Amino acid sequence: MKNIICILLMHLFFLPMSTCLYAQNSSDSKYLFKMWLFLDHSNDHSREIPSATAKDSVIFKLFDENIELKFDTLKANSFLKEYLFLSVNPKGGIKYSPTTNKLIYLSIPSDSSTYVLCVNKFQGTSFRLKGFSGNDLFSLINEIIEKSKKEYKRKLSMRDVLKQLNVQDIDFDCIFRGLKDGNHDPIRYPCLQRCTNIEVVF
């Protein structure tokens, strides 16, 4: 997970390594959140850009300039003091504010789940925990395990870390069980409900 932002930016946007390293280590949560939203959903039709156009730095720049996000910061226990847990509700937290004459927005269904992104305040790594098409809880736990092993010489299991995770409005046990079972059924595991059918429209 540590290098995923860098890799995605390099492959999708053809950016140099120095730019990728900056993005990876940046704690600009708004930028990271926008990037995940952009990568998470498929392109739709456009008046000016063919529907087959792949995501690239030009399209992301338009997306970044025209989308405004309103965050809520979720409360977390001291075990997670290095992390920010940011929540965006699609019903009121994502706004289309065009700065160009391009048609660009997020088409959001009324039954959308809330997005939650976890950001390491010091390393800039980020982890999708709710609403996105994927969930990075295992990657978050593994980062904590590696840090504990390296800095404190403590060997923690995934279960050890899971017991310590306590964040407002996030059911980590439900997420863990759903991911372990490989079952994303939102009825059985409501914590894995995704913001489905959202498209980035240009």
Image (cartoon, helix red, strand yellow):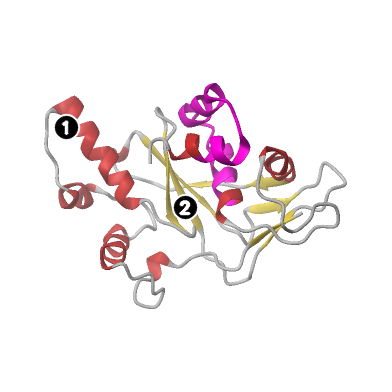
* SS at mark 1 in the image: helix
Residue found at x 19% / y 49%:
158
- Check if residue 197 falls in the magenta segment: no
The segment highlighted magenta reads: 8-37
Residue tagged by mark 1?
149
Crowding at mark 1 (Cα within 10 Å: few <14, some 14-19, many 20+): few
| Residue projecting furthest to the top | 18
Q: Please provide percent x and percent y for residue 55.
A: 65, 47
Rendering coords of residue 100 (x, y %): 85, 42
Magenta stretch prevailing secondary structure: helix
Which of marks 2 and 1 precedes in the sequence?
A: 2
Q: Amino acid at mark 2?
A: Val
Q: Amino acid at mark 1?
A: Lys
Q: Check the image and report above or below for 54 versus 45.
A: above
Q: Residues within 10 Å of mark 2 (few under 14, many from 20)?
A: many
Whether pointer 1 and pointer 2 mark residues with C-beta atoms closer than 8 Å, the reply is no
Left or right: where 155 falls relative to 35: left
Q: Residue at x 54, y 47 (%)?
A: 36
CA gap, disc 1 and disc 2: 27 Å
Residue lying at the far right of the rendered structure:
101
Instruction: Decide if residue 74 is on the left or right side of residue 45.
Output: left
Front residue of this view, candidates 22 and 195 = 22
Camera-side residue of 21 and 110: 21
Pointer 2 residue: 116
Q: Quadrant of residue 16?
A: top right
User: Farthest residue toward the bottom?
Assistant: 187
* Residue 181 coordinates in the image, percent (x, y): 26, 68
The residue at 49%/57% (across/down) is: 132
**Left or right, residue 125 beside residue 197:** left
Q: Is residue 100 left or right of residue 172?
A: right
Residue 26 located within the stretch drawn in magenta: yes
> The C terminus lies in which quarter of the figure?
bottom right
